[in-house]
Amino acid sequence: MLAKPDYLNELKNTGDFLTLSRNNEWHLEASEFALENGTRVTIHDTGVIEFQPRVTTTKDVVLSSAVHGNETAPIEICDSLIKQIISGELELAQRVLFIYGNPKSINIGLRFVEENLNRLFNGHHTVDGTPMNDERVRAAKLEQYVSDFFDRGNAQSARFHYDLHTAIRGSKNEKFAVYPFLHGKPWKKSQLQFLLSCGVNTVLMMKSPATTFSYYSSFVHGADSFTVELGQVKPFGENDMTRFAKTKQTLTALISQNEVEYPQFNAKDFELFSVHRTINRTQEDFSFTFSDDAENFTGFAKGELLAKDGDTSYVADVEGEAIIFPNAKVALGQRALLTVVPMQIDSNFV
Ligand SMILES: O=C(O)CCC(=O)N[C@@H](CCC(=O)O)C(=O)O
Ligand SMILES: [Zn+2]
């Protein structure tokens, strides 16, 4: 039996788990209670809240936001869903774990505090000879919460994790998802249909393991898992929430219905890209040739210079090689740029 901490009455009345998490940046006493409709609510920690409906469920769904604290639109979507669930307005049919990844970084309005949380998953939080910090400790705990959540689900339940982000730059394709490397397993058309229903018609297929939250859930727990980029970073209050309506509706249907029907798959509805290469920053002297407002998915002609890393020049080596997530200010050793090339649906999709 968990303790009944002081915050519980207010949480039951307001449903405001976001403010509670922001007021307790790195730790919150665990607790639990039941809603009138029988759903069990478990607060595991700051930013980590689980809902278990009374009915038999078939899906275990993790919805994370604020892995980067300044990416506010996904936080607003999750805040609204959590409030609707706690008030009883939205009745769940599936188990859901909501995660605000880095509450302190929300408060300071920055991507991270000391270190990019989304480079610390899949065990990278704990490395011999590297001192722990708050983000490393948080990454280790988040992995454990996700593990425990999936472990406690029905053995037959399908597992999902949508890690919701917004991108630093504008994007030619406003919404897009990163499909983590599946180690040869096929990509799922049903997941593309889910993403399309969210308003996401563009998907990037990764070709190697990563240290991201979505790769962790995919690789370790076999979840259908994605990093989903829903637009461009904006401060709280500046998001046009109408641009996220389809995403919110689709997530609502996912967690409140037994089965969701999506339209029939049609390859023409999608723009798919395969990751061509990852360029890491290894030198202090690192720069791009394109401007700070060049958008994601901008393509370059074969032979054009893309970036300089000390004495190394990176030149587009295929026609139309397009840039994703360029960031010249990342820590040394980290990804400064992904490049992608278009791909077609092939036999590796089921
Ligand atoms: O716009 C940017 O430069 C970064 C947006 C962002 O946070 N993207 C994620 C992608 C994670 C993945 O590759 O699955 C990140 O960089 O962590
Ligand atoms: Zn992000």
Image (cartoon, helix red, strand yellow):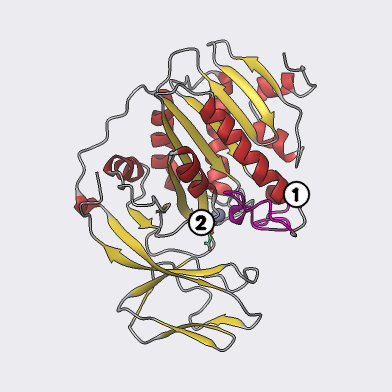
In the image: residue 102, left or right of residue 302: right
Residue 70 location, x and y as percent?
62, 53
Q: Which residues are magenta?
A: 107-128
Q: Classify mark 2: helix, strand or loop.
A: loop
Q: Quadrant of residue 322?
A: bottom left
Amino acid of disc 1: Asp
Residue 31 location, x and y as percent?
71, 21
Mark 2 within 8 Å of ligand 1, using the beta carbon: yes
Q: Quadrant of residue 339?
A: bottom left
Label disc, if present, on residue 134 of the rendered structure: 1
Residue 132 location, x and y as percent?
76, 52
* Residue occupying image coordinates x 56% and y 89%: 311
Task: Return the residue nearer the eye: 194 or 349.
Answer: 349
Q: Quadrant of residue 58?
A: top left
Residue 241 location, x and y as percent?
49, 45
Q: Residue furthest right?
A: 6
In the image: residue 157, left or right of residue 328: left
* Residue occupying image coordinates x 66% and y 80%: 284
Q: Is residue 71 visible?
A: yes
- Picture layout, residue 245 above or below residue 111: above
Question: Pointer 2: what residue?
Answer: 210
- On-image quarter of the N terminus: top right
**Which comes before the other along the chain, label 2 or label 1?**
1
- On-image quarter of the C terminus: top left
Task: Return the residue nearer the eye: 301 or 241.
Answer: 301
The answer for how far apart the CA atoms under marks 2 and 1 are is: 21 Å
